[in-house]
Image: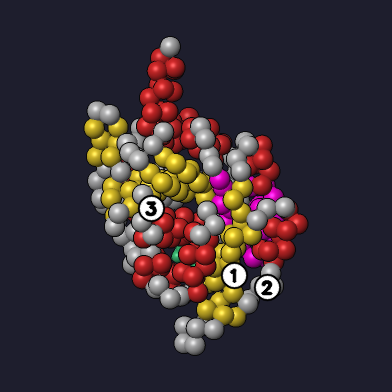
Amino acid sequence: EEEFAKRQKRAQRLCGIRRRLVVMSGKGGVGKSTVAVNLAVALAMKGYRTGLLDVDIHGPSVPTLLGMEGRPLYGQEEGLIPVECDGLKVISAGFLLRSPEDAVVWRGPMKSNIIRQFIEEVIWGELDYLVVDCPPGTGDEPLSVCHTLERVDGALIVTTPQKLAAVDVMKCINFCRAVRVPIVGLIENMSGFVCAVCKSVTNIFKKGGGRELSEKMGVPFLGSIPIDPEIVAAGDEGRPFVRAFPDSPATKEILKIVGEI
Ligand code: ADP
């Protein structure tokens, strides 16, 4: 009975969210958080009521990428209140750490508990989009994210262009199919290099790899975001690049992707 009451409460808190999207990757370091943050910021800039949930509990980078480090998280009797940043509502495990250097040493059961709490106990209100920055990989953590959300409307899979990444993408696709999460599509990050001087794009890896891969695997291809030193600088300074560099090739790709999700 208690379980039923809990599920009902969770359903009530989540029911104001129209589109629930998870951003996944087969492994860490491919730019999943950067993509999730910039997609959420772009959606908010377009006037959609948007929430960003960072459940990457081992490396919560969202507060850094948004320049929100050290902002406290407040709770009420009814639940946690998201922290607002330029119209975007944000919840991150990073808000629970005293400093970004603090290590997260939660054990397995605690991990799924904190993930569950983060999803169940937030008062989002009415949202057009909830963008979830998932923990990397296809293990227990993304699984509990998908289960707790109850309904996931789509997954965006972030990858890099190397041939080696194909295995990771396949794992993500199989994961989504197993948990019956529709795949919105594949995003290739760090594809090509933007010259800081002339802004031309050099393809370091074989061009078209991401598109080829998505065709082979039967999922839509959403776009490729080049490697851009400005992205690193913007991220380090806590400014999302879609805001800091509205004319960059990376921003154009993000805006194109936003039109498709
Ligand atoms: P993940 O969430 O997959 O672990 P992050 O989003 O934290 O990856 O990105 C890892 C690092 O790569 C960060 O320092 C980020 O600034 C950088 N990065 C991500 N995407 C790009 C890009 N397209 N161009 C340049 N640097 C990038």
In percent of width and height, residue 119 lies at 41, 36
* Category of crowding for the residue at label 2, using alpha-carbon neighbours closer than 10 angstroms: few (below 14), some (14–19), many (at least 20): some
Q: Which residue is mark 3?
A: 48
**28 horizontally vs 234: left or right:** right
Kind of residue indicated by mark 3:
Tyr
* Position in image of residue 147 (x %, y %): 53, 32
Q: CA distance from mark 1 to mark 2?
A: 8 Å
39 drawn magenta: no
Quickly name the residue at label 2: 207
Label 3 residue SS: loop
Helix, strand or loop at label 2? It is loop
**Which amino acid lies under the numbered mark 1 shown in the image of this protein?**
Ser
- Residue 168 lies within the magenta run: yes
Q: Nearer the viewer, residue 57 or 216?
A: 216
Question: Which image quarter is the N terminus in?
Answer: top left
In space, the residues marked 2 and 3 are separated at their CA atoms by 33 Å
Magenta stretch bounds: 154-172
Task: Give the camera-side residue of 178 and 64.
Answer: 178
**Are there few (<14), some (14-19), or many (20+) residues within 10 Å of tag 3?**
some
Q: Is residue 204 above or below residue 28?
A: below
Quick check: is the Cβ at mark 1 less than 8 Å away from ligand 1? no
x and y, in percent, of residue 116 in the image: 44, 32
The residue that disc 1 covers is 191
Tell me the mark number nearer the camera, choosing from 2 and 3.
Answer: 3
User: Quick one: which residue is furthest to the top in this view?
Assistant: 1
- Asked if ligand 1 lies within 8 A of label 3, the reply is no
User: Is residue 7 shown above or below 247?
Assistant: above
Given contact means CB atoms under 8 Å apart, are the residues at marks 1 and 2 in contact?
yes
Residue 114 seen in the current view: no
